Image (cartoon, rainbow, N blue to C red):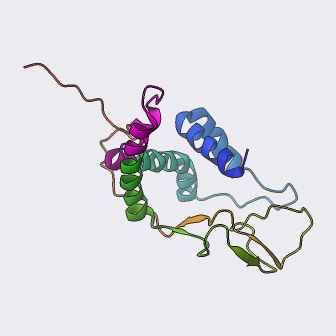
Amino acid sequence: MSRFGVAWRAFWGLLRSPELAARWAAFLSAPVAAASPPPAAPSPSTTAAVTESPSAAADAAVFTLVLLQREGRLVDFLQEPLEGFSDAQVGAAARQIQADCRRVLQKVFGVEPLRQEAEGSQVTIPAGFDARHVRLSGPAHVEPPCTGVLRHRGWRATRADLPQRHPGLDPHLICPAEVDVDA
């Protein structure tokens, strides 16, 4: 499975499982190397920020789903079994959902491609390139500079401007149930 596929499954797994999210947060906060000197005792404000971080991150992730659901009905689409629909019906729905969710991504995150070249074009990877931004595939022992075919342009967020969420709302609620009552 590609790293994107693993990341996608991990993202949804972390959203669905508070236990998995807590284990992931503990993993991220674990020391990297045993040989490093012990960290200084954290101040009370630092401790509070570290303690609140996983919850705040989870709340922000859920709120991203709220925006994608509210504007594009993405969660409805992803949770809907599609077996009973024709390809034309799914395609028509997906076109509108994609346009609405794309608007949210641009408004809130400013998503833009990492590379400007067209996918399928020849690109040159210089020596000293940032391996966080480019994943090389192919022969295992090629040293940059090298050339190759751009298979995916990559994406980055230029900002993360989530609107303020009212503190009285349930941070785990994506969308309330809707009930049409009889008069």
In the image, the segment drawn in magenta is 66-93
- In the image, is residue 67 part of the stretch drawn in magenta? yes
Going by the picture, which residue comes out furthest to the right? Answer: 141
Q: Residue furthest left?
A: 183
Q: Main secondary structure of the magenta part?
A: helix
What residue do we see at 59% from left, 37% from top?
A: 13
The quadrant of the rendering that contains the N terminus is top right
154, above or below 6, in the image: below
Residue 67 visible in the shown view: no
Of residues 81 and 39, the one drawn nearer to the viewer in this rendering: 81
Quadrant, the C terminus: top left
Q: Is residue 112 left or right of residue 85?
A: right
Look at the image and say whether residue 91 sits in the magenta stretch.
yes
Query: In the image, what residue occupies the spot 71% across and 66% down?
Result: 132
Residue 51 image position (x, y, % from top left): 56, 48
Residue at the top extreme of this rendering: 182
Where is residue 10, by image quadrant? top right
Work out whether 173 lies above or below 8.
above
Query: What residue appears at the point 41 percent right and 57 percent down from the top-left corner?
Result: 102
Q: Is residue 47 left or right of residue 100?
A: right
Examine the rendering and report whether any part of residue 124 can be seen: yes
What number of labels is visible?
A: 0
Q: Residue at x 38, y 48 (%)?
A: 97
Estimate the x, y position of residue 12 in percent, counting from the top left. Answer: 56, 40
Residue 80 is situated, as x and y percent measured from the top left of the image, at 43, 31
Q: Is residue 164 above or below residue 177?
A: below
Residue 4 location in percent, x, y? 66, 51
**Which of these two is toward me, 30 or 12?**
12
Q: Nearer the viewer, residue 159 or 48?
A: 159
